[in-house]
Image (cartoon, rainbow, N blue to C red):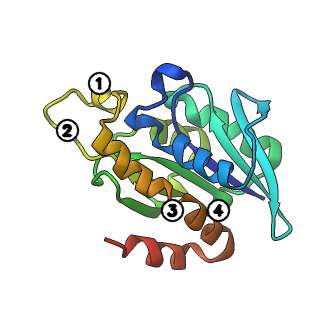
Amino acid sequence: MKLIVGLGNPGKEYENTRHNAGYRFLDTYAKNKNLNFSKHKFDGVYAEFNYNNEKVILLKPESYMNLSGEVISKYVSFFKINNEDILIICDDLDTKAGKIKLRYKGSSGGHNGLKNIEKHLHTNEYKRIKIGISNDKDHDTIDYVIGKVSKEELNKLNSVNSLAVKILDDYLNMSFDNLMSKYNSEK
């Protein structure tokens, strides 16, 4: 079983913010696959489907970013999901807008959602797709990440989202090493 998690904050006021890059990425995939986030459990909304005879859960935690790990750990426990079968999709300040980085593990990089996941999973070893939102050092980090994206930024983020189906289908079909080689090398 695979658990693919898009991080973000629930509610209309956060819909077009930088921090909701993970939600938007999953939404794009779900829409393309005609999946609906219609199931609710443990402060999360999810869709499930079978891919190559394996159950896949797409999860959007609804407890706010800083508490994402609490929600994810409940799904991991309830559905008996191994850490190596978890993929987290989130925004990343250290990557240029419109670019992505794939990683097996690593520090939170100051990302409060990732800090909470690490705390509740008791490890930083889980796969992640980090969607670049750049870093505007002229603004407070919190205000920046929960700020609305500009039209230019949205175009860059939409170019990443246009790859959502390809990237997640590849994730379900190939090793993560091959996936990283394929997408981390794209400039």
Q: Are marks 2 and 1 in contact (CB under 8 Å)?
A: no
Residue 125 visible in the picture: yes
Quadrant assignment, res 55? bottom right
**What residue is shown with label 4?**
84
Chain-order first, disc 4 or disc 2: 4
Foreground tag (3 vs 2): 3
Marked residue nearer the N-terminal end (3 or 1): 1
C-alpha distance separating marks 3 and 2: 25 Å
Q: Are marks 3 and 1 in contact (CB under 8 Å)?
A: no
Q: Secondary structure at mark 1?
A: helix
Tell me which amino acid carries mark 4.
Glu
Q: Earlier in the sequence, mark 3 or mark 2?
A: 2
Q: Secondary structure at mark 2?
A: loop
Q: Nearer the viewer, residue 178 or 14?
A: 14
Give the spatial CA distance, label 4 vs label 2. 33 Å
The amino acid pointed to by label 1 is: Asp
Q: CA distance from mark 3 to mark 4?
A: 23 Å
- For the point 78% across and 34% down, the residue is 38
Q: Which residue is mark 3?
A: 163
Given the image, on which type of amino acid does mark 3 rest? Leu
Residue pictured at 41% horizontal, 52% vertical: 131
Location of the C terminus (image quadrant): bottom left
